[in-house]
Amino acid sequence: MIFSLTTFPTNLLDLPSVDRRPSVHVGWRRRHRNPEACACQTKKQAAAESTEDDSCGGVATYATNAPFVSALMAFAERDTACFHFPGHNRGKAAPAMLSQLFGPDVFTYDLSPIPWIGNLFSSRGPLSDAQKLAAEVFGSSETWFLVGGSSCGVMASIMATCSPGDFLVLPRNAHISATHAMVLSGALPKYITPECSSVWDVAGGVTPSQVETAIEELKEAGKTAAAVLITSPTYQGICCKIDEITKLCHSHGVPAIVDEAHGAHFKFHPRLPKTALEQGADLVVQSTHKVLSSLSQSSMLHASGHRVDRERVRRCLQALQSTSSSYLLLASLDATRAQLSENPEAILGKAMEMADLARVQIEQIPSLSILDASSFSSDFPDMDPLRVTVGVSRLGLTGFKVNELLCEEHGVMPELEGMRSVTFVFNRETSVEHTERLITALSHLSTTFVDANQSRKQIGSGVITPFAGFSRELSPREAFFAKKRKVAIGESLGEICGELICTIPPGVPVLNPGEVITREALDYLQDARSKGAVIMGAADPRLYSLIHPADPHLLHGRRLPEVELMMVPLVRSCKEAGPCYHIWIHNEGLAGLSCCGAGGCKKVSASTLLPGDPVSHPHSTIASLLEAKLKASGGSACSTSLSSSSNELTQDHERRQHTGVHYKCSGQ
């Protein structure tokens, strides 16, 4: 028998009928019924029959409410000759070890994108329907599913609102994905330093007044903020006043982005803080997999209002997400949304009870304490009641050591460990038995180590804040793409950092590309590593050396002549070396000139070095005139000869880029 490929989808979806909604396009110029018709049972049938015996794999109680899950199950249950990816051929060719680990069924649903089921870049079909239903449940105008975690959502949000040279206002403890987004977009950071508790070694949120100050400081410098990014809640559950911050942003015409990765569950219990969407945020990123039930790496990006160009958001997501998105991750997002549609308060009610029980009991254990809003001098209105952060420094132990003891000796796995604390997260299936095991384990640690360590100094007293005194010499993008050199850590103080270095968790940068390496940052990193923290991003995780831009005197980042070319010296030692000139040459000629001396870096007239109209001079003329001027004044080119600088400028002329050259003029 010969089959027509054009009729294949119809036969494939020829299943018992259920209530139907408007049909959707399937294949080339064909229309078929909504994929909800592919569900194994109606809601009424599902409620009457046991999910254990159901052929849909135990999800039939809400399968008809989950269009993507329903369509995926319907396709996977058919006897289909597979001539498509992935190569495990629906499990038949899967490695035996992997089949033993996952079981055989998971491979049935791990499919390459099926046209009539949809992909992340299609605007119709079951996946599109699933995202629209998610928007309704979470309260957004539009929702996009993410398979690259909330990192993908943060990067897309920044890229959608910031162009090269734009300023992004953000807290210094923002996730590393924000730095990656600035590298990709060319945006420049305007950092806000959050309050850091030295008692807890925990960074809090930022206040509305800090946000306003940052925006006003940019205005005073002739700049504007393209967007404001706020992290709320933090890893420990500390929430900012998002409603006040969003109103402030909107009064300045600036969109508000909220990294709410740790607050995807806020909408689903009355005791939880209000969501960022409820408080007026324009773009909100949520990790649906953290407290809610989707698979790891699956998240959502929500948009509200019309301040952000959603088409640009889509383009950014297309640039960042895979065209072969995992159907398993996408199905988990659809199923989780359907789960929340049933009885959300009941889902998190038990978790709330267990967290309350743990909090009360732990507070009674000697030498342990619980993080709350009073731990900070700033007014942070809410904390996530499902996060319990326990201070352990009075045990004479670090949070890293407590984490190790809890895991190895008591079978208790915390979510986050720090220098002086450990954080536990409660979810819908946290049981009484597990909560009691946690309390017993902490009581045992208290009994064991309080007496043994009475004479020891408590861990971390006088801890240094890693964000103290940071400054930026290069943009994240310039430093990231610059040629690199390795310098021993003992010689790196005052140098420019060429890599992004953080401790994990939580993935907050201690040093960003382009920042000056400070004593506080070095001490913090070395201290954290010695106490058990994992260092991420450093080429040398042992921290014997650090990576720096190879030549900060000569840059090839794009520079626009109408933009302020130089605010601070490119070379940190130039003040010690005496007065020097920063000459900025565009492809048409000289674009800017600054003189750096004891009084700082100041703009000077181009005629100081060059006669006539300096912009009209070709590069070779500029180089020869500078050389003559420098020789007459007893100066010399810094780190590179003028002839090689001229060659570099000629290459830049061909690439139509901008170049900065630093000349030392010791005789001036």
Image: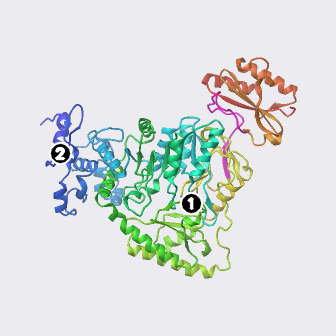
343 or 472: nearer the eye? Answer: 343
Give the residue type at disc 2: Arg
Q: Is residue 282 left or right of residue 336?
A: right
Q: Quadrant of the C terminus?
A: top right
Q: Is residue 512 left or right of residue 230?
A: right
- Residue 600 position in % (x across, y down): 78, 39
Crowdedness near tag 1: few (<14), some (14–19) or many (≥20) residues, C-alpha within 10 Å: some
Mark 2 to mark 1 CA distance (whole Å): 52 Å
- Residue 313 position in % (x across, y down): 44, 39
Please say whether residue 480 is visible from this viewpoint: yes
In the image, is residue 560 part of the stretch drawn in magenta? Answer: yes
Q: Label 2, on which residue? A: 20
Q: Label 1, on which residue? A: 379
- The nearer-to-camera label among 2 and 1 is 1
Occupied quadrant, residue 522: bottom right
540 or 386: nearer the eye? Answer: 386
Q: Is residue 606 above or below residue 358?
A: above
571 or 380: nearer the eye? Answer: 380
Magenta range: 545-568
SS at mark 1 in the image: loop
- Residue 322 position in % (x across, y down): 41, 42
Please say whether residue 92 is visible from this viewpoint: no
| Residue at far left of view | 1
Crowdedness near tag 2: few (<14), some (14–19) or many (≥20) residues, C-alpha within 10 Å: few
- Residue 459 position in % (x across, y down): 64, 70
Nearer the N terminus, badge 2 or badge 1? 2
Residue in the picture at 20% in, 33% down? 30
Give the residue type at disc 1: Asp
SS at mark 2 in the image: loop
Q: Quadrant of the N terminus?
A: top left
Residue in the picture at 24% in, 54% down? 63
